[in-house]
Image (cartoon, helix red, strand yellow):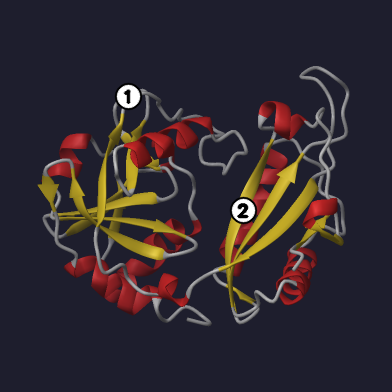
Amino acid sequence: MSTYAVVNGKILKEEAICISPNNRSFRYGDGFFETIKVVNQKINLKDYHFARLFSSLPLLGFDQPANLSPGYFENLIEQLVIKNNHQKLARVRITIYRGDGGVYDQVSHYPNHLIQSWPLQTSINQLNENGLVTDVYTRARKVCDEFSFVKSNNYLCYAMAALWAKSEKLNDCLLTNPYNFIADSTIANVFIVHDGIIKTPPLSDGPVSGVTRKYLIEHLPSIGMPCVETSLTVGDIQQASEVFFTNAIYGIKWVKSFGDQQYTHTIAAQIHKQLIEPLPGL
């Protein structure tokens, strides 16, 4: 059975889609992407996703045609998940990329877009039963500049870290920035609980600006759990009572161990129950 994708507004069979070898995203990572969870044809945290997408366009120098609106993407996503029979529960990826050209060539800044979908298992909606086993990756550093919070198509440091984590039989690993502060993990933002305070690295330390991260920072005070954005060291991770990761697909996953350090997950479970489970469609 064929799987379909959307290319610049047209639904095509994936096997019929070709991207030029001169494409700047393929050559240089010139673009960004958005990973979205769809439940019963509804986009979770929709406003957060589209706010990030449309703030990334001008930051990376893309044009924004009048027809490219949140409603435009929402309509295409709905059509695609129905076409692929993924409407119940799906992961959707929107990839934005510039066209062909060299580094200094005069190129179009039209935001070419590719939308794909994959089915998800219902277990993704539940807090992980077994905590994650993690450590820190030291062979690459996440830069911290005005582009570091973008979900860039240039994913090399995360890809290398993920390969290392797999080779070490870890579920994920942390990356630090050049100043030895924690940035994020290969696919998630990082939170810790220390002395009853929830903490997460600020965007100035290099993490991707995750939508679930932003959602929690805004809504944790409503359940009596304020969150502080502050720089975190490896030592802070080791001294925490809890560590949990967040992203748009699974919401929250709690960490069982970081190196030799072991953690509980009482706060993470409360957050999952009070802020993640009530999200539309879950």
CB contact under 8 Å: marks 1 and 2: no
Residue sticking out furthest to the front = 1
Dot 1 or dot 2: first in sequence order is: 2
User: 60 above or below 43?
Assistant: above
User: 234 above or below 132?
Assistant: above
Disc sitting over residue 154 in the figure: none
> Alpha-carbon distance for marks 1 and 2?
28 Å
Tell which of 168 and 124 is nearer to you.
168
Please give the residue where the numbered disc 1 appears in the rendered image: 179
Residue 264 placement, left or right of 280? left
Tell which of 249 and 213 is nearer to you.
249
In x, y percent, where is residue 244? 28, 56
Residue 115 placement, left or right of 101? left
Task: Tell me the kind of residue under disc 1.
Answer: Tyr
Q: Is residue 68 visible?
A: yes
Q: Residue at x 36, y 63 (%)?
A: 252
Q: Secondary structure at mark 2?
A: strand
User: 181 above or below 16?
Assistant: above
Please give the residue where the numbered disc 2 appears in the rendered image: 34
Q: Secondary structure at mark 1?
A: loop
In x, y percent, where is residue 139? 36, 23
Q: Residue at x 65, y 48 (%)?
A: 55
Task: Tell me the kind of residue under disc 2.
Answer: Glu
Report which quarter residue 59 is drawn in.
Answer: top right
Q: Quadrant of the N terminus?
A: bottom right
In x, y percent, where is residue 155? 55, 35
Residue 124 placement, left or right of 90? left
In x, y percent, where is residue 49? 60, 60
Q: Residue at x 33, y 78 (%)?
A: 274
